Image (spheres, helix red, strand yellow):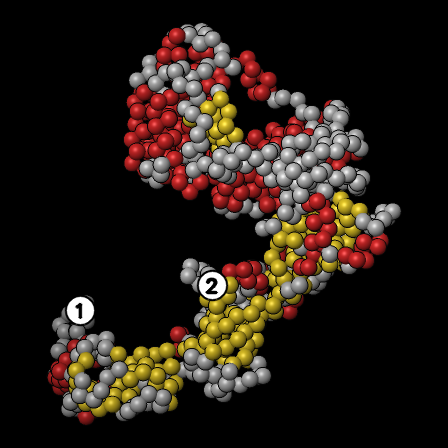
């Protein structure tokens, strides 16, 4: 029932009381399991090879037909007036460009006509100067009428007739269908009032919703096939012309617009459609379209594709290369093919997954569990980012049974990534046996050869570099640091590790390589915190399993512990404990105002400290710690919410613990160090209390009792 409990002889489980059973010898790897051929048949274990191949991702969307906004025209009133006659009586009428639409009586138009007729009847004055051109009042009057919406032909007619017209006819600027009639005959209109709306239905838009998980496979200019309820079985086609840059937070979808030609008029606005986009996927999750090799495409109108650079025939914008829009346009090659694994082989655990790989040439069926990093799903396959190689045979049927076998053997599995059972993490003060309680450990680890030890120490040092970049919140440097971690991991000479310890290194190395794969791609501090939490676990796992030397700082730590400090240093330290504890209590109570008030005594105490003149080493150390303390308190003063205060409090707690180790915090209280493993996306954080009753300042009421370590200082 609890496979983490192991003894050298018979006995009972300390958790459930059941009798212990003998442990059979298993395969030597950390995640390996061996079964007999008969058991393999009963489990119906089936395998498939990992391949490099192009896969097709089918993206299905729904939406509806809408007007092409670029082909909508609104017939509006250019001047105030009264609608004398409306030639289009109802919506749905098809009109051509230049058809008369409405007659309008306007006092302003009538006055402007009179001005034109008046100036054209006068004789042009003769200028006596060679340098001054006479004013052309007639042309000014004509321009005024043009600005009021009259055409050149209408103005000429007025001049030829020599008489003003009481009404003026407005003509349609485009051909199409009248889809809106906003006024009635006799209505008064003001400048800008809409009278009609005309739409060109020969070109339409199809607006569809795409889920955010499908966005990896959608590109501008892709071909789209869709069907309608009106014409079942008939397929219409268009191209993606726009992908909305903003996600709808309610539906978690993005609008995708498709331009569609509708010369036959069969598609109607507001029709529902079902669409599918078939994306050929290349390596790196890029979309493959060899037909666009060497092509130039309009960034506004995807139907315009040319063999040479030039301008769009519709809008005149310069064409761009298809590759710039995210396509792989080269002819298919093995290098461009993505590494894919069947979806049925993957046991999902988030961005990472567990697969079981058949070990070749084994005496009996043997399978090894591997943690891999996967990319998006494309049809029946997942793209593999790291953890597998081409040709590996992965279990596609029976993998859950193999995972259960590993779990029973207390080995790492999907359900128990650390191996063994639970325990140790306290959410409510309940005492539970630890994960390693009752486990009889084998012989102590063998010494590592210097080359291996130094290489592993390089991993530890690089981890510290990543930690510093995480605290600085510099994403570019975090990604670069993970690149360096990759080099440190690959520098470990596995062939020089003894056979007893080599499986442990293969396990840790696999986990660290997966950390590198994700760390190189983080694009937010939330992601960086999550990946760093995993990296911390895996580095701690390596340090626990391999005898590594202490770092320089660790070697110096004992000499700095409880160092004899002058009375001046002790006196300056004495004023920080009480306000620190007040801040901790306020955060545990989720009291923002009280937390802000608790920061001020810390600032006042720090500001009141005078420099200490001494050659004592402890004074030098205290001066350095004061500078760090000043930066942390300044950060707390700027905080305006609980999340920022808790982030600064974590730094303050580390500083207080460091001061406790160096000098000892002067107080009559009995202090305890507590640790929450879940704080800050799994990074973990410690704090100090004056008693051992857990009050978590990082979660407050939501997880007040969460702690996995309570130690008296």
Location of residue 275 (image quadrant) = bottom right
Q: Residue at x 63, y 21 (%)?
A: 550
Neighbourhood count class around disc 1 (C-alpha, 10 Å): few under 14, some 14–19, many 20 upward: few
Q: Nearer the viewer, residue 698 or 506?
A: 698
Where is the N terminus found, in terms of image quarters? top right
The span from disc 1 to disc 2 (Cα, nearest Å) is: 66 Å
Which comes sooner in the sequence, label 1 or label 2?
1
Q: Is residue 529 visible?
A: no
Secondary structure, mark 2, is: strand
In the rendered view, tell whether residue 174 sits above or below residue 691.
below
Q: Is residue 33 left or right of residue 666?
A: right
Q: Nearer the viewer, residue 391 or 337?
A: 391
Q: Residue at x 37, y 78 (%)?
A: 72
Residue 271's spot in the image, x, y percent? 45, 80
Residue 48's spot in the image, x, y percent? 76, 58
Residue 353's spot in the image, x, y percent? 64, 50
In the rendered view, tell whether residue 416 sits above or below residue 125.
above
In the rendered view, tell whether residue 363 sits above or below residue 230.
above
Q: Residue at x 22, y 87 (%)?
A: 184
Location of residue 593 (image quadrant) = top left
Q: Nearer the viewer, residue 23 or 343?
A: 23
- Numbered tag placed on residue 253 in the rendering: 2
Q: Which residue is under mark 1?
A: 132
């Amino acid at each position: 029932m609890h496979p983490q409990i192991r003894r050298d002889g018979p006995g009972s489980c300390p958790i459930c009381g059941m009798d212990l059973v003998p442990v059979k010898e298993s395969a030597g790897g950390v995640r390996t399991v061996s079964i007999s051929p008969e058991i393999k048949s009963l489990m119906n274990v089936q395998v498939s090879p990992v391949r490099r191949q192009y896969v097709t991702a089918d993206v299905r969307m729904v939406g509806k037909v809408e007007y092409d906004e670029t082909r909508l025209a609104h017939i509006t009133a250019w001047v105030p007036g009264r609608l004398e006659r409306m030639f289009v009586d109802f919506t749905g009428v098809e009109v051509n460009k230049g058809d008369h639409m409405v007659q309008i009586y306007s006092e302003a138009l009538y006055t402007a006509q009179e001005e034109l007729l008046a100036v054209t009847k006068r004789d042009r004055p003769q200028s006596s100067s060679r340098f001054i051109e006479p004013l052309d009042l007639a042309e000014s009057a004509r321009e005024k009428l043009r600005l009021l919406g009259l055409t050149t032909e209408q103005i000429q007619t007025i001049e030829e007739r020599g008489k003003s017209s009481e009404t003026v006819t407005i003509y349609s600027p485009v051909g199409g269908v009248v889809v809106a009639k906003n006024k009635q005959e006799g209505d008064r209109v003001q400048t800008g009032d809409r009278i009609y709306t005309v739409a060109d239905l020969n070109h339409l838009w199809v607006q569809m919703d795409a889920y955010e998980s499908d966005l990896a496979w959608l590109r501008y200019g892709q071909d789209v096939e869709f069907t309608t309820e009106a014409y079942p079985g008939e397929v219409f086609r268009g191209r993606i012309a726009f992908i909305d840059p903003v996600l709808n937070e309610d539906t978690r979808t993005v609008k995708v617009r498709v331009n569609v030609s509708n010369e036959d008029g069969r598609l109607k606005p507001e029709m529902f459609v079902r669409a599918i986009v078939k994306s050929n996927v290349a390596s790196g999750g890029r979309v493959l379209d060899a037909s666009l090799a060497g092509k130039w495409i309009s960034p506004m109108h995807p139907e315009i594709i040319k063999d040479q650079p030039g301008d769009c025939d519709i809008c005149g914008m310069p064409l761009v290369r298809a590759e710039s829009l995210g396509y792989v346009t080269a002819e298919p090659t093995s290098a461009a093919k993505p590494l894919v694994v069947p979806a049925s082989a993957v046991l999902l655990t988030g961005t990472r997954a567990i697969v079981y790989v058949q070990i070749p040439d084994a005496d009996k069926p043997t399978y090894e569990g591997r943690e891999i990093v996967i990319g998006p799903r494309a049809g029946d396959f997942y793209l593999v980012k790291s953890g597998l190689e081409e040709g590996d045979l992965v279990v596609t049927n029976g993998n859950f049974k193999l995972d259960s076998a590993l779990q029973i053997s207390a080995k790492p599995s999907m359900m128990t990534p650390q191996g063994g059972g639970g325990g140790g993490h306290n959410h409510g003060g309940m005492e539970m046996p630890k994960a390693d309680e009752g486990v009889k450990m084998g012989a102590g680890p063998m010494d590592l050869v210097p080359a291996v030890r130094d290489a592993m120490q390089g991993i530890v040092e690089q981890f510290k570099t990543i930690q510093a970049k995480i605290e600085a919140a510099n994403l570019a440097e975090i990604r670069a640091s993970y690149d360096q971690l990759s080099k440190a991991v690959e520098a470990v000479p596995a062939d020089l590790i003894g056979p007893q310890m080599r499986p442990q290194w293969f396990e840790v190395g696999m986990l660290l390589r997966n950390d590198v794969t994700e760390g190189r791609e983080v694009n937010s501090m939330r992601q960086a915190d999550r990946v760093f939490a995993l990296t911390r676990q895996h580095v701690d796992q390596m340090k626990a399993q391999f005898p590594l030397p202490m770092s320089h700082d660790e070697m110096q730590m004992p000499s700095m512990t409880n160092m004899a400090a002058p009375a001046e240093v002790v006196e300056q330290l004495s004023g920080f404990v009480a306000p620190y504890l007040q801040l901790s209590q306020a955060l545990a109570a989720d009291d923002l105002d009280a937390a802000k008030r608790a920061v001020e005594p810390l600032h006042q105490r720090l500001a009141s400290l005078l420099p200490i003149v001494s050659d004592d080493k402890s004074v030098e150390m205290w001066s350095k710690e004061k500078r760090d303390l000043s930066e942390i308190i300044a950060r707390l003063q700027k905080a305006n919410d609980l999340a920022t205060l808790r982030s600064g409090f974590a730094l303050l707690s580390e500083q207080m613990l460091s001061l406790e180790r160096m000098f000892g915090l002067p107080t009559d209280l009995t202090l305890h160090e507590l640790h929450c493993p879940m704080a800050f996306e799994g990074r973990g954080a410690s704090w100090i209390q004056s008693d051992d009753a857990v009050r978590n300042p990082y979660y407050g009421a939501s997880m007040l009792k969460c702690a996995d370590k309570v130690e008296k200082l």
